[in-house]
Image: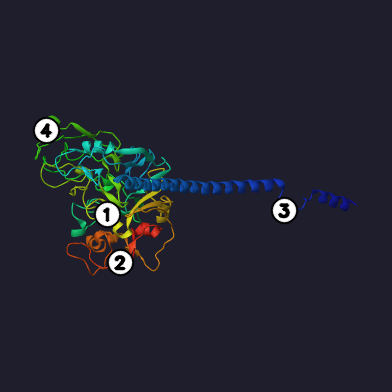
Amino acid sequence: MKGSASEGRALIRSPTPRSGGFSLLELLVVISVMLVIFGLIGSSFARKDSRRQAVMTSAEELAATFRRARAMAVDRKATFAVVFNIQNDPDSSGRVLNNRSGGHWYRILRPPSTGDQNTIDNIPDFPTSIFGPYTVCDYKANVTSCWMDDTHVLPARKVRFLSLTDMDWGDFTGQDWQSYGRRPGAGGSQTFPRPWFGWWDGATKRLYPWGGYDPAIAPSGFYFWGNANAPSGYYNIQGVRDPIAPTVCRNTCDRYLDHWVVCNTNPPRNPEGVGTDLLYANGSPRPLLNADWRDASLLFLSDGSVRWGGWLPARHLRDYSGPNQRGVPERCNAQPGGFGGPNHHTKTEASNFDQDSGGWFITLAPDADTDKDTFETAKDALDSLMPMVRVFVSKFGEVRVIPVSRTPKFAGTAPFPTTANWYNTGSNVQREFGMDRVVDRSVSASDGTGLGRVVGAPITDFITPDMLAKRQVWMR
């Protein structure tokens, strides 16, 4: 009996065996965790979709503006332009293009109503003679008087211009690179050239974007200072360059221009007009590309065709010699160019592959939340730029919106060049990129025109991490 009682007590104390299932409480906990995870995944997809939609919407609006400008040009038998402005957050470094302050915008420019003779294709430009605007300030006034309609501002903190051309070459020591064999980086850095999608340097882990400004890299950000020892009578500016390089996107001093005497064949400086025109003020925002100076634009002509509107025409000099200099050479490489600026394929800080692609590309991307420019991998760097959308305008006025893919489309060709260091040899660039054409290596004219068999084509609608790391912009 005692044994039976003891066994009974032991039986009562034994735990109840589990059935192997989950309790209601445990099921609720699991479901709650899964909902949180799905919520995070869903919000991530929603954010990516929102970014993609914002960029696409801005690209469609830009495309519509291009079509409208072309339609007005054809209808009114006159030339209209679409002009671009890129102003980084004034207190940002500028090493990464950003639209956090809403400084990325574009606007339609109409012909002058007064028939001003200082035009190119009926659009305000620097004069070829002494008549007309005499300083950049006058030129700016001529441009701003021709603005049409409202300004189209890309949504601040959402969308930015990633690039306005196919390549950012930086400065190149004042030589025509087509003729002399350009060695990018001769201005003090091997970070050039920078394709429209930029360059991720595997050694430093740094992303060098198109147009990025760094005070440690003199030619960067379209802010080359020019010649510090230029003769005093050669530039119509007080002092040749700012005393210090800006560390943020603000001007570092007051810049005044001398005003010229009107209607003299060889105008002397006007004593009463010396240093009277304020070009920009100390501490004021410094645009990377200034629409008021028509730094970058596309021209829509009356026959429906399209032309590039020159590159930094208010900054490049008209001529090397004489007292008739009108540009602001401390903001460019000081290449001469005549009416409309220098040849933008061979002599400017940025250029297009329009002779091969048949037109021009404007690239948009999500805005940069911070100035972060270092990434562990090329894929991480590319993720920070996507999704990209490019708006293409052909020479005949066709406009297309092209989402940039991550899927390569070489179709029997290979990406070129093979390594990022390929650009460090100037003869490579002269031989392979003469007049924006990759030509047969065995055929190169002595004048650098790149005569030869056309090989390959520029890459326009896709980007891979490997392309970003090797600066590959061509298929061949």
Residue 429 in the figure: left or right of residue 237: right
Closer to the camera in the image, 396 or 445: 396
Query: Of marks 1 and 4, which one's residue comes earlier in the chain?
Result: 1
222, above or below 436, in the image: above
Query: Of marks 3 and 4, which one's residue comes earlier in the chain?
Result: 3
Residue 254 x, y percent position in the rendering: 22, 33
Nearest to the eye among marks 1 and 3: give it: 1
118, above or below 361, in the image: above
Closer to the camera in the image, 263 or 237: 263
Residue 28 x, y percent position in the rendering: 67, 46
The amino acid on which the numbered mark 1 sits, given as a three-letter code, is Gln
Residue 380 x, y percent position in the rendering: 42, 53
Q: Do we see residue 39 in this rendering? A: yes
Q: Are marks 1 and 4 in contact (CB under 8 Å)?
A: no
Binning the other alpha carbons within 10 Å of mark 2 as few (below 14), some (14 to 19) or many (20 upward) gives some
The amino acid on which the numbered mark 4 sits, given as a three-letter code, is Asn
Q: Which disc, if any, is residue 455?
A: 2
Query: Of marks 1 and 3, which one's residue comes earlier in the chain?
Result: 3
The amino acid on which the numbered mark 2 sits, given as a three-letter code, is Val
Q: Quadrant of the C terminus?
A: bottom left
Q: Are marks 3 and 2 in contact (CB under 8 Å)?
A: no
Query: Of marks 1 and 2, which one's residue comes earlier in the chain?
Result: 1
SS under mark 1:
loop
Query: Of marks 4 and 2, which one's residue comes earlier in the chain?
Result: 4
Residue 454 x, y percent position in the rendering: 28, 66
Q: Residue furthest right?
A: 1
The amino acid on which the numbered mark 3 sits, given as a three-letter code, is Gly
**On the image, numbered disc 4 is attached to which residue?**
270
**On the image, numbered disc 3 is attached to which residue?**
21
Q: State the CA–CA distance, disc 3 to disc 4.
A: 96 Å
**On the image, numbered disc 1 is attached to which residue?**
190
